[in-house]
Image (spheres, coloured by chain):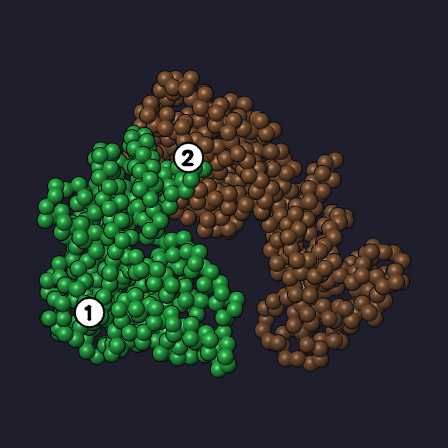
Chain colours: A green, B brown
Amino acid sequence: METEIYLDNAATTRCDEEILTAMHRVLTEDYGNPSSMHRKGYEAEQLLKKAGEDVAAALSVRPQEICFTSCGTEGDNLALFGAARANARKGKHIVISAIEHAAVAEAARALAEEGFEISTIPVNEYGIVDPEEAAALVRPDTVLVSVMTVNNEIGTAEDLPAIARAVKEKAPGVLVHTDAVQAFGKMPLFPARDGIDLLAVSGHKLHAPKGTGFLYVRKGVKLTPILYGGGQQDGLRPGTDNVPGAVAVSLAAVKSVRDLAERSGRMAAMRDGFVRKLYETLPEIRVNGPAGAAVMPEGTERDRLLAAAAPHIVSLSVPGVRAEVLLHALEDKGIYVSAGSACSSHAAKKQPGTATLRAIGLPAGCLASTVRFSFSGETTREELDKTVQALAELVPTLRRFS
Amino acid sequence: MTGTERPVFHTDRCNAYIIKYAEIGVKGKNRHIFEEALAAGVRRALASSEGEFTVSSIAGRLYIYTVREADSADTITRLQHVFGVLGICPAVTIARIEKKLPDIDALAEHAIRFFADGYGLEQGETERERPLTFKVVCRRVDKTYPLDSMEVAAELGERLLDAYPGQLAVDVHEPEILFRVELREQVNLFIEQEEIPGPGGLPAGTAGRAMLLLSGGIDSPVAGYQIAKRGAALEAVYFHAPPYTSDRAKQKVIDLAALVARFAGPIRLHIVNFTQIQLLIYEKCPKDELTIIMRRYMMHIAEQLAQKNHCIGLVTGESIGQVASQTMQSLYATDDAVRTMPVYRPLIAHDKQEIITISQQIGTYETSILPYEDCCTIFVAKHPVTHPRLEVIKRHEQVIEEELKALVAQALEEETVEEVTG
């Protein structure tokens, strides 16, 4: 096997050594339970407090507004179920975008079974939500609007400040939640300034281990907990505090925002170069989402779209090649990417592609032929060049046999 | 205890299993080979158990005695997987103490306890709508025992009646419970009616080796099971087509082989890279004949592998008319590719639902329906031929014959082998 080129960082990332060391120390030395009354517990409590402060600082919010969770899905679930149930008396209407991650979309579906009504905001061909359309769906009985900051499949970065503003202008009491799992550490986030009430982040996308994450809950926002128990995390998320996980994700948060502008600028430049090379090298392909604008002539339209592209995600459709086949062929060359759908079950054959790809109106020939490349801060230009080269070798052969 | 049904028999305290086998009884001079193979199958099935057992063949039965205890339900399930086993009778065995079998008093105590443990009877007067009818039959192999078999049976019958008044009644003609007492090198107590059916068939490996064409589907594992049930030892071949099939698809086939191996014994699984062959056929042959030509080459490669590995037959999961490549005409065309050995198709006359039922019974279904592609399902024409004509197919094959020959040789050269145990 040649050297490994890991371009699936939107799925998960390698654990950072420094984070691992910090976590190891907590697990083996500062392993107390913050709920214990003795010194060992107190020390752990201090670590947890510090972790909350660090995360809060990374988001420019208050430490009391951070609730540690086990993953992005938990954060999204806590936000949706928590806000919906706590506000059910005000109304039973929820608005979500058409390209939400399953953690939001499926939670909404479950709420629909509890009697909530769900409205879906359509997106344009780039996956962009129009803030006015979001606001238009808000009704007197709407309690929550949920739009993800960055889409995990096509990398569209929504204009959350504008969405929150439009929604609250129409109905100030409506809560705004965002799944920021793919956005945190890739772009600056200021939920307090921007009118965001709830914001979910996952640790393992930031080089922290799986099983870590946090939810920002604006002060004053009432959530009904999902778990009940010993009152940890202000009763919002009881269960023995995961101090090593909190330490890990807080360190990840600190590291993610430390050199954010430089890193995301570098990644965005690599993304544009990658997209241009893909178009130069491979005939009849299509880069989905706003990242594809890299090949547009210079001008305001190009700038507008690239501003709406996350720096680390490139969605590529190669009509005539099945996504899993391309994935396995790349894997054979040591390059790891994602396919739109994890497997080609019979269900997937009947309805190819994913909800997001269908929502942006991707042509039928592209739905089952879309792969995703996602970078980390460690991804290099050389790796991306090698990937383009591998694709140039593989695609003509694969296209012959389809 | 009330009720008129025969109560459930609890095997928790059983420490011996008496195995009945049928067909091997008639195999004449080869009988010992079959018995040894059956004992080997039993040992293999019990090898990974928590317990330890001795297995011996006595008077047309296999006696399995527990040396270190194991969960009896688990032991029985294991024995139910051994081909050649017709029935399993859970028993309680009592070893000699200081070279002596228990005297009649001790024997009666054991018998009374056997009924308490097995049927949950409680000594003394207990309400029961109707007594359970029973009969004691004793077989005295150890002729030094002071009482003869009739005396032992009569004495035990009486003591049991005394212990469970109103709960038991003797019926020598049609007893609900036929209580057997064997006085051998040890004492065995068991109930004839509590025999649990085994899978039947012939002991694994007594019939010769066969090469199973194993895909990730529902049918081929069942075909392997069926043919192994008739005593065949199995090798298997899987056609892997990376990148069109994934490592997960390959692992699925290895998992299926392991499930079949629980019954069939260890399986050598040959993994052949079929990609280049498939692509060449795809490019050079008419699309609607793709599947037939591909299957002909799979058969051809399987035959070569079979010859190399001393197999004397191929096994497939085909069933007439199930899909386009399994019409009688297609089978005629596929069969032609094999020259030197029979192709066994144990499912040939089974309906799909029957095959699914068996796969559920033998536990391969859940794995078979995992959604990973195998190479048959990837390059499929929209309308494959259902009535292929062999001459036409052969003419189309001829175009690429030389190229294919080289690719087949290469595929055989590069095959890898997984030793799969159940």
Residue drawn at x 78%, y 71% as measured from the top left? B109
* Residue in front for this viewpoint, A184 or B370: A184
- Residue A339 visible in this rendered orientation of the protein: no
Residue drawn where x is 44% and y is 56% of the image: A17
Instruction: Determine the image quadrant of residue A239.
Output: bottom left
Q: Secondary structure at mark 1?
A: helix
Tag nearer the camera, 2 or 1 = 1
Give the camera-side residue of B41 and B110: B41
Chain containing mark 1:
A
Type of amino acid at the residue the image marks with label 1: Arg
| Residue B131 x %, y % | 65, 73
Total count of labels? 2
* Picture coordinates of residue B365, whole percent (x, y): 46, 49
- Residue located at (83% from left, 71% from top): B105
Which residue position is annotated with label 1? A193
Can you give x and y, in whole percent of width and height, for residue B8 in the image?
61, 67
Label 1 neighbour load within 10 Å: few <14, some 14-19, many 20+: few
Q: Which mark is residue B241?
A: 2
Distance Cα–Cα, label 2 vs label 1: 54 Å
Identify the disc placed on residue A172.
none
Instruction: Locate residue B142 relative to residue B337 in the image: left or right.
Output: right
